[in-house]
Image (cartoon, grey):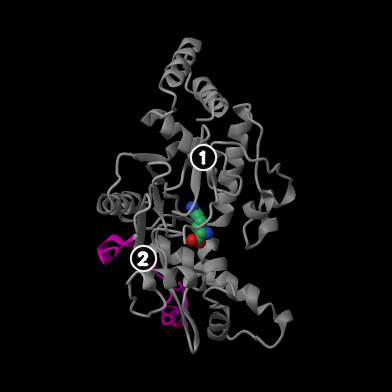
Amino acid sequence: MNLQEVQRYLSLYQLEKNESEAWLTNRLHEIKAVGEYIPTTEELTFGAQVAWRNSNKCIGRLFWQSLHVVDARDTLDEQAIFEKLLMHIQFATNNGKIRPTITVFAPGRVRIWNHQLIRYAGYETAEGIVGDPHSVSFTKICESLGWKGEGTAFDVLPLVVQVDERSPQVFSIPQESILEVPIRHPEREEVDALGMKWYAVPIISSMRIQMAGIDFQAAPFNGWYMGTEIGARNLADHDRYDILPAIANIFGLDTTKQASLWKDRALVELNIAVLHSFKEDGVSIVDHHTAAQQFKLFEEAEATAGREFTGNWSWLIPPLSPAATHIFHKPYVNVYNTPNYFYQKPPY
Ligand code: ARG
């Protein structure tokens, strides 16, 4: 136990939750007597929400207080953990009306090997990579653990769960638990024929949450997508699905000259298609202009609360038309306060 960190954390809790001085003294007394700090579910909930508030890379932080926190610290059986993960997927997906959710497992005991709970496999083949190149190494791990995908460009990877030093267990996610959106363009049916799709809910499962000096290595969390994450990165990046040349072809753009700005025009059409498809299917998504406006409200709310604002400019600016948002035009202080979400070494 890091008593200084516990004190710091509980002082923040006391301040923001309007607890009394006596409450704090008493709580610290208790903790010292036990010799270990085990957050109550309320303390855990607040910590996870503040960790979101402190996430400098995230443009969606206005909604930090709405984070739904599931306390799963007592779940230590692989099958039961898998079921908690399915419940997370179902609760968060909510038939498309996505709810920001985190499920927190026992610190130091549980690891989820996946980068996100729902993610597409990537296979190295003689004809190049099929699927998501981002997943190639994890896909190999899943195969070495006995899983075999169909080999399409959009195979959902299985969940890989590890408890203590036991060997990891592999669980397939039932298809009916996975909401996906076929990508189509409001004006050009040829885009639909490309067969692109994306899953509805990005649930990051590779990061740890740190609060009061405790590391929770398994704490999958989600919000909803900003359109550009899919339309300007996942489907567009040259080292991801690399779909821009196909879009340019459909729109008859001149790909022989950089200066025709075919990439820029294809990017805009692809992002229109992503937003249109999610909206039409009733799946929560936000465009980058609206997200930037919401982020401005968050900055203002933080100022009103008297807190020093922190952010990571290079992550906050959207990858499409960044200078059309206010974020581009001002500096942000990238100091990492805790509680927060951090990267950690993959377990494989
Ligand atoms: N950028 C990641 C992806 O495209 C998801 C990161 C979290 N995004 C979010 N909107 N909460 O899969």
> Is residue 79 magenta-colored?
no
Q: Is residue 207 visible?
A: yes
Q: Quadrant of residue 280?
A: bottom left
Chain part drawn in magenta: 169-197
Please state the horizontal and vertical placement of residue 53, each as a whole percent of the image.
54, 39
Q: Residue at x 35, y 59 (%)?
A: 168
Q: From the viewer's perspective, tell me whether residue 335 is left or right of residue 282.
A: right
Q: Judge by depth and name the residue closer to the eye, 109 or 148.
A: 109
Q: Look at the numbered discs 1 and 2 and tell me whether their residues touch, using CB distance below 8 Å.
A: no
Q: Judge by depth and name the residue closer to the eye, 81 or 176.
A: 81
In the picture as drawn, the residue positioned furthest to the front comes out as: 165
> Is residue 172 magenta-colored?
yes
- Element type at mark 2: strand
Mark 1 or mark 2: which comes first in sequence? 2
Q: Is residue 286 visible?
A: no
Q: From the viewer's perspective, tell me whether residue 321 is left or right of residue 168.
A: right
Please state the horizontal and vertical placement of residue 49, each as a whole percent of the image.
47, 37
Q: Pointer 1: what residue? A: 210
Q: From the viewer's perspective, tell me whether residue 171 is left or right of residue 135.
A: left
Please determine whether, in this image, residue 113 is positioned above or below residue 71. below
Q: CA distance from mark 1 to mark 2?
A: 31 Å
Q: Residue at x 54, y 23 (%)?
A: 7
Q: Residue 180, labelled with which disc?
A: 2
Q: Amino acid at mark 2?
A: Glu
